[in-house]
Amino acid sequence: MVVDARGADHRGEVSALCRQVVQECAARNFCAVVCTGGGTVQRRLAAQLDEMLNRRGIALYVPECWGEYTTAARVLIGSALSGGSLHCRLQEAAERFGGPERIALWMERVAEDFFLPAALGGGTALTGQELSRLMGRLKPAVFFSDELCARYFTYMTGEGGAHFVLFDDADTLRKKLQIARRLGIRRAVARWEDVSDLPPEK
């Protein structure tokens, strides 16, 4: 089950909602609840669900910013980075939250176009079709970043602007899973459309 706080009006009784979530999980035999979104209400919800679901043996996954509000929940750490090292990021998260068993890799298949210099560290998101069209038009030399565990290429616009495109494919996602496993992180969560083309493990 996915519980998403986006668009919530932040009114209502959190305890009653927690009971409804637990009842729905029991009725449908769900094995896990994934909390997404944000807001103070959702944090209180995560804290109460942490206790209620743990008693029933149902796993709870929460965003990193809510990790401190839970004791048994698995904390989702995103796989997409625009700087630094994925290995170090996961290692630091495991140390912060008490061990790799509390961490789950949030598999994000992303593609971003950064106009350089990207002072704020953010780029323009590209859909899969947009990325394919861009690569088809430019036919760029594509490289692999060991630190980010992602592919990238660069190109110039007619106005002289430099662009850096960072993206994932099935192979980079598989490599990210391998990095997590080497650190003792055994769980991952992903949208089906992001991982449906991953090759089967040998």
Image: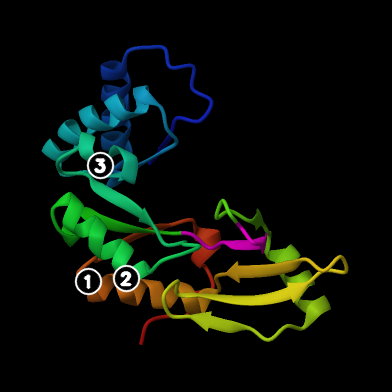
Residue 109 x %, y %: 53, 63
Name the amino acid, label 1: Leu
Q: Residue furthest top?
A: 12
N-terminal of the pair, mark 3 or mark 2, is: 3
Asked if residue 49 lies left or right of residue 85, the reply is: left
Name the amino acid, label 2: His
Residue at the image position 78 percent from the left and 73 percent from the top:
156
Instruction: Write the start and end of the magenta stretch as one range.
Output: 108-118
Asked if residue 19 lies left or right of residue 63, the reply is: left
Given contact means CB atoms under 8 Å apart, are the residues at marks 1 and 2 in contact?
Answer: yes
N-terminal of the pair, mark 1 or mark 3, is: 3
Find residue 143 and name its label. none
Name the amino acid, label 3: Gly
Residue 79 appears in the picture as rendered: yes
Residue designated by label 3: 67
Residue 90 x %, y %: 29, 63
SS state under label 2: helix
Residue at the image position 25 percent from the left and 56 percent from the top:
93
Find residue 87 and name its label. 2
Residue 116 x %, y %: 67, 63
Residue designated by label 1: 183
Given contact means CB atoms under 8 Å apart, are the residues at marks 3 and 2 in contact?
Answer: no
Badge 1: how crowded within 10 Å, few (<14), some, or many (20+)?
some
Alpha carbon separation for disc pair 3 and 2: 19 Å
SS state under label 1: loop
The answer to whether residue 18 is above or below residue 151 is: above
Alpha carbon separation for disc pair 1 and 2: 8 Å
Mark whose residue sits in front, 1 or 2: 2
Residue 63 appears in the picture as rendered: no
The quarter of the picture where residue 48 lies is: top left
Asked if residue 119 lies left or right of residue 78, the reply is: right
